[in-house]
Image: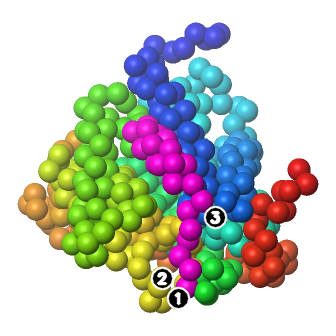
Amino acid sequence: MGSHMPSGLNTGDSAWLMVSTAMVLLMTPGLAFFYGGMVRSKNMLSMLYMSFISISVVTILWFLYGYGIAFGEDAGGLGLIGWGDWRLGHIAPTALQGAIPKQIYVCFQLTFAIITVALISGSIAGRARFGPWILFVVVWVTVVYLPIAHWVFADSGWLSEWGVMDFAGGLVVELNSGVSGLAMALVLGRGIAFRRGAGPRPGNIPFVLLGLGLLWFGWFGFNAGSALTDGALATRAFVSTMIAGCAGMLAWRTLEWLRFRHLTKLGSTSGALAGLVAITPSCAFVSVEGAFAVGVVAALVCTYAVELKLVAGYDDTLDVAGIHGAGGIVGVVALGFLSTGWERGAPGLFYGGPASVLGKQVVAVLAVAAYAFAVTYLVGTIIDRLFRMRTTEEEQARGMDAAFADE
């Protein structure tokens, strides 16, 4: 065969997937600036680094064994975990996955794993030590992300075989990071600012908006790239992503105005993010009107979800549980009602589908949330006990960047 690609290659699909992979990778630097701008300036540098270090660590893991566990041959036929395909060195550049090069598919999936663990850093912003964070990234991706990715994204995964719909990662990325973030917020306890009742004082609002812009740009690759083709499916996912993000932004703003008669600095970013999160699992399965509805409902639900921490007293600093967790649930469950049954996917209740479609979506939410929460809580507790992940009050008062001061 030599260096020539086999005849099954679709060059348009391949080009779109390469671009999508680069776009999704850019979401993690985008997240770094989004989070970095939201925290006080004394913590900005460490927030940026928590995201950037995830890129390098997760990439090496992925090429050593990560891809094999998530997408390898199913072990034992239970749909719980993949096995084998350990090293990616034996996949030739000419090998195909459908009509695209397999190596590019592997890289595309890698970028999802990177941003999912980086998202968790927002729940523990300003109160986790950097060294233990790196260890957390390694262990969490291995024992939480990889199995859940196998359940949902691999053809042989149990949720995938059961017919659960999650187009681009509402379960694997959004719900998973939100629930895991909540678990870590509980493990590390409340920060001094939270205990004093001081809200987060964003150090740099322009950085937050820049971060949102980069995330939004990348999200088109995240959602439309998940079609693995540049045709009608990708088109539908692309347009849904645009509409839901904008609907979420405006709905959040409107609700803020109705409730408080004033607009907060970060409200529009939270609203857009809520819409984008919720459309992730549903983007290719819903109509244009459905995408609008998902964005609006996500903004309404997430508005109240982010306030839960004040009632319940957990310090989810940058609202990872409130937006990614709650928004992920909205998007996954909404499919039980709004899925049109076009192309892939079963029709939801509003399109004449059976209640079992909704039931499966709900079961998937409960299964992923329970697993992610329990295992993350355990992993976080062990790492904190062994290596003191939690910062002292003095370290928090000084700011996390003081640890980088001598760099």
Mark 2 burial class by Cα count in 10 Å: few <14, some 14-19, many 20+: some
In the image, which residues are magenta? Answer: 197-222
| Amino acid type, residue under disc 1 in the picture | Gly
Secondary structure mostly seen in the magenta stretch: helix
Residue 266 falls in which quadrant of the image? bottom left
Front-most of residues 250 and 26: 250
For this view, does 59 lie left or right of residue 257? right
Q: Which residue does the numbered mark 2 point to in the structure image?
A: 309
Q: Which residue does the numbered mark 1 point to in the structure image?
A: 313
Report the number of numbered marks. Answer: 3
For this view, does 186 lie left or right of residue 313? right
| Quadrant of image for the N terminus | top right
| Amino acid type, residue under disc 2 in the picture | Lys
Asked whether the viewer can see residue 246, the reply is: yes
> Residue 122: percent from the left, percent from the top?
59, 64
Front-most of residues 97 and 322: 322
Residue 333 falls in which quadrant of the image? bottom left
Quick check: is 220 in the magenta stretch?
A: yes
Q: Is residue 366 above or below residue 156?
A: below
Q: Which residue does the numbered mark 3 point to in the structure image?
A: 40
**Nearest to N terminus: mark 3 or mark 2:** 3
Contact flag, marks 2 and 1 (Cβ < 8 Å): yes
Q: Residue at x 55, y 49 (%)?
A: 207
Whole-angstrom CA distance, mark 2 to mark 1, is 5 Å
Front-most of residues 82 and 361: 361
Mark 1 burial class by Cα count in 10 Å: few <14, some 14-19, many 20+: some
SS label for mark 2: helix
